[in-house]
Amino acid sequence: MPYPDEESIAVAFTTQSHHAGSFAVTSEAWVRGEPSQQSYVLPWTLATLKDDLHVVGRQGSVTGEFTDQVTTATISYLDHSEGSDSA
């Protein structure tokens, strides 16, 4: 767990690329670890991790730049204020 005294938010990794808007995790994006199959991140699939019980089979770590790209995409799914017609 990156922050053992706090909750963490994680996104789903998958080996399926048929989801529009998924991010391919390239070799350059991996800092540590790299699964044998191509991985993709689904920025709209979030999970709250409260302790090590929720972490199964850590795959590795990705760069801050890749994390920032996924974070920006995740926020765009959650924040509809820019395109909202509400007054």
Image: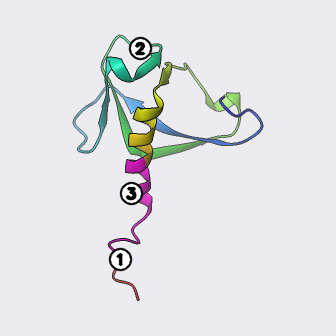
Q: Nearer the viewer, residue 1 or 15?
A: 1
Sooner in the amino-acid sequence: mark 3 or mark 2: 2
Would you call the spot at circle 2 few (<14 residues within 10 Å), some (14-19), or many (20 or more)? Answer: some
For the residues labelled 3 and 2, the Cα–Cα distance comes to 27 Å
**Does the residue at mark 1 contact the one at mark 2 (Cβ under 8 Å)?**
no
Left or right: residue 55 versus residue 67 is right
The residue shown at (23%, 44%) is 20
Q: Nearer the viewer, residue 15 or 86?
A: 86
Image quarter for residue 34? top left
Badge 3 is on which residue? 77
Badge 2 is on which residue? 34
Q: Name the element at disc 1.
A: loop
Q: Nearer the viewer, residue 73 or 11?
A: 73
Badge 1 is on which residue? 84
Q: Up-down: is 53 above or below 70?
A: above
- For the record, the magenta segment spans 72-84
Q: Looking at the picture, which amino acid does disc 3 mark?
A: Tyr
